[in-house]
Image: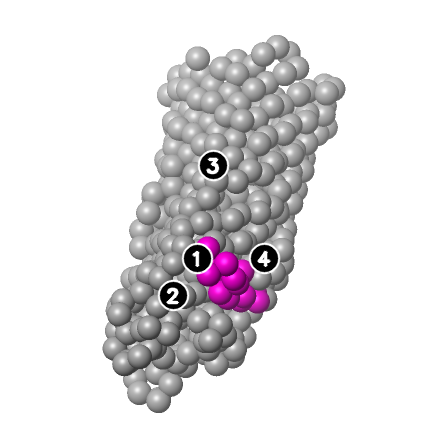
Amino acid sequence: MKNNLALTMTALGTILLAANANAAGFHLREQSAAAQGNAFAGATAGAENGSYAYFNVAGLTRQKGTQLNVGGTYIAPRAEASNVRASDGSRGADVNNIVHAAVAPNATFSHQLNEKAFLGVALNVPFGMITKYDQDWPGSDHGITSKVMTATVTPMFAYKATDKLSLGAGLQMQYVKARLTSSASQYGVDNVAMEGDTFDIGYQLGAMYEFNDDTRIGVAYRSKIKHKLKGDIEASDSTIPGVGAMVGPLLNQDISARLTTPAMFSVGAYHQLNEKWAVMAEYQRVFWSSFDSLDIYGEDTSSMVSRTKEHWRDTNFFAIGASYQIDHQWKWRLGLAYDQSAVRVQHRTPRIPDSDRIWYSTGLNYQYNDRLSFDLAYTYIKAHNAHLDTKLTGNVGSRVTAEYTNSVQLFGLSLNYKF
């Protein structure tokens, strides 16, 4: 019984790992319109305004006085499943607009205490997405609707240890809320809905070394966060006589799900070539392999309802970029990045039709006056086509195959103000 229930209860953790075209796994990288213009190349070393503190808190030492950065990114994904076939070989309807559009806001406030010490606080949405299939699509056992919302508040401190070296640390205080629906056809259940939330804490560390006024490097680490979501699972009545009474206690109870979000290590470089041109580069390693399994416990039955082994791999992100100072007010940015998928083809599911992707970015900075400036960015991300065959994943339930085509457009805007 537990093995059969594993499919319908991939639940509160896997919802975070669902189809998402704009970053490997479920990480939302869009935390700075300025950095986005360079495809996040040099984000760990750039420190051009307060928003870069998400990538490296040590960069706060370059934000003199008291500053505020407020921005957001409109995420417009397009994910389509074509050539959908059920276990009996019948052709299902193509599914369009699986991933829904959303806005990811961000804000950073920083204050210089003295020549060496700097304080800051940031609000970010580092994870989040919405996916939705038709209720009657052939893969409904594997997922219909997935929603996740996160909000992270990070108090930060940075210290200029020497004229060249800056160090920083922050405390990630993260709230996660998730909801998942699917069907359970083997029990004649049309709808199984699970939801839950949690508040947990992690940390981030950073260092920046400035060789001179033109060249600097940065190194940063964001810790993994161990989450324990608590919520409930509810199912519609079974259409199979006698089954409802058998599975009712398992499909209608309070539950908890344990999962670990990955640690991240990044290193970036920034170099000002001359008065007009600057170049930058970035490497990030995301340790997805720490997400070893998803364990779901029934609070009412006091037992493990399901254990789903995950097969995620650590991923690499590479980016290069350049900026051109057009005049004293306008700066043009561009960047190119490669983002590796956390999921191999044999472990791809309808909730995770993940694949490698290429980022193409450009942006503008407008310096209105000495206190106020704006950043605008646009990114097009093209993901490699992804083949899905649920038989390869070893999941219980109806087999479904499909071909996925994923892309996303990102529109970033931010305001920077110096008090």
Label 2 to label 4: alpha-carbon separation:
28 Å
Give the side of residue 384 with respect to residue 274, left or right.
left
Residue underneath mark 4: 291
| 318 and 131: which is toward the camera | 131
The label shown at residue 300 is: 1
Q: Amino acid at mark 1?
A: Asp
Structural distance between the alpha carbons of marks 1 and 4: 26 Å
Q: Nearer the viewer, mark 3 or mark 2?
A: 2
- Give the foreground label among 1 and 3: 1
CA–CA distance in space, label 1 to label 2: 8 Å
Q: Main secondary structure of the magenta part?
A: strand
Chain part drawn in magenta: 294-310
Instruction: Tell me the element at label 4.
Output: loop
- The image quadrant of residue 43 is top right
Q: Are marks 1 and 4 in contact (CB under 8 Å)?
A: no
Residue 88 image-quadrant placement:
bottom left
Dot 1 or dot 2: first in sequence order is: 2
Residue 249: give its label: 2
Q: Compare marks 3 and 4 and give the one earlier in the sequence.
A: 3
- Under mark 4, the amino acid is Phe
| Residue 109 screen position, x and y as percent | 47, 22
Q: Is residue 324 visible?
A: no
In this orientation, does residue 243 appear?
A: yes
Residue wearing tag 3: 152
